[in-house]
Image (cartoon, rainbow, N blue to C red):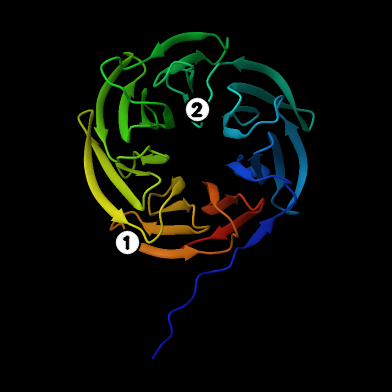
């Protein structure tokens, strides 16, 4: 009888962050760099040729990095648990701090860039609200808030490519579909009794996936500005910190409290592999444009994988 192959090993691992990893972001493929945010507020810039840290950015408060995104190839925005967004610009081989937005938000939700509108969306100090900032002036332009419902804190947020629309996951277990251009909520659907810990959406596959502290994953699609519930997947162990759908829409990965990364096929939602390298909760994921998967853990290590 042919034996079933075991899970693959990482291509390589990155060590030396000195703090649990809280967010990961690949840079432009030409630079071969990975940016990692840590619980102590440090951002490491990893050279993927040498597998070493080539520099760090230090946020002011020393609190967890919740989110990072490139505004352009030479401009980076970060957001921390202290409620401060920092803007950096690459110049002469290093990253210089060029601006910041100070909010009073205190929570776990990151931010998004709405490129169609040149806006930055960040959680507000007002429960359930999202504040929109002009990316050029860094000034707040308006707030989005659904006054008809008690949704609790904003927990997760995801933009829709080439659109003014985006999804927000809430503490009450629901997900809202917002339109920033018209400042309105288009639809809202409840998926869990617990909070929405993480979510991702692929417009190419018209598939959204969300996770919670439970052992269930839920999927959805959108039709005419409505959220249409899809399948529910029961997983062996509870708790999800992050979900990422790969850019080619073929697979997605989940980061689990059980120290594992689970790989699923998008088309049939079938489990394909369980990656078991880490010794503590896996907190964040990112796919590169050439389909490398980076996984960051509370064990302070980053593992990199080539999957399918």
**In the foreground, 167 or 204:** 167
Give the secondary structure at mark 2. Answer: loop
Which corner quadrant of the image does residue 234 belong to?
Answer: bottom left
Q: Which residue lies under the disc numbered 2?
A: 111
Instruction: Please count the marks in the image.
Output: 2
The answer to which quarter of the image holds residue 68 is: top right
Q: Horizontal placement of 246 versus 106: left or right?
A: left
Residue at the farthest bottom position: 1
Q: Is residue 288 visible?
A: no
Which quarter of the figure has residue 225? top left
Q: CA distance from mark 2 to mark 1?
A: 30 Å
Q: Is residue 200 left or right of residue 304?
A: left
91 to 21, vertically: above or below: above
Q: Do the CB atoms of the residues marked 2 and 1 lie less than 8 Å apart?
A: no
The N terminus lies in quadrant: bottom left
Q: Residues within 10 Å of mark 2 (few under 14, many from 20)?
A: many
Pick whichever, 103 or 181, lies toward us: 103
Give the image location of residue 197, x and y in percent: 42, 40
- Residue 66 horizontal/vertical position (percent): 56, 33
Residue 184 to residue 161: above or below: above
The answer to which of marks 2 and 1 sits earlier in the sequence is 2
Residue plotted at (57% across, 51% down): 294
Q: Is residue 277 visible?
A: yes
> Mark on residue 270?
1
| Residue under the image location 60 percent in, 56 percent down | 304
């Amino acid at each position: 009888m042919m034996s079933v192959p075991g899970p693959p090993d990482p291509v390589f691992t990155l060590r030396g962050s000195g703090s649990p990893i809280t967010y990961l972001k690949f840079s432009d493929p030409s630079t071969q760099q990975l940016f990692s945010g840590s619980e102590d507020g440090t951002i490491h810039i990893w050279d993927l040729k040498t597998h070493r840290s080539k520099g760090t950015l230090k946020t002011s408060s020393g609190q967890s990095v919740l989110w990072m995104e490139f505004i352009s190839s030479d401009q980076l925005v970060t957001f921390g648990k202290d409620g401060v967004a920092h803007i950096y610009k690459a110049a002469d081989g290093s990253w210089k701090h060029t601006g910041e937005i100070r909010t009073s938000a205190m929570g776990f939700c990151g931010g998004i860039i709405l490129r169609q509108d040149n806006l930055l969306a960040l959680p507000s100090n007002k429960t359930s609200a999202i504040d929109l900032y002009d990316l050029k002036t860094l000034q707040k332009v308006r707030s989005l808030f659904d006054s008809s419902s008690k949704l609790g804190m904003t927990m997760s947020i995801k933009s829709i490519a080439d659109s003014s629309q985006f999804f927000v996951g809430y503490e009450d277990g629901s997900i809202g579909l917002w339109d920033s251009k018209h400042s309105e909520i288009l639809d809202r659907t409840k998926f869990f009794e617990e909070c929405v810990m993480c979510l991702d959406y692929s417009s190419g596959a018209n598939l959204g996936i969300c996770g919670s502290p439970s052992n269930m994953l839920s999927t959805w699609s959108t039709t005419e500005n409505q959220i249409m519930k899809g399948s529910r997947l029961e997983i062996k162990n509870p708790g999800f910190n992050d979900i990422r759908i790969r850019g080619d829409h073929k697979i997605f990965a989940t980061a689990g409290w059980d120290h594992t990364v689970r790989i699923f096929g998008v088309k049939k939602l079938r489990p394909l592999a369980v990656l078991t390298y880490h010794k503590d909760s896996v907190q964040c994921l990112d796919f590169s444009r050439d389909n490398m998967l980076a996984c960051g853990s509370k064990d302070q290590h980053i593992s990199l994988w080539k999957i399918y």
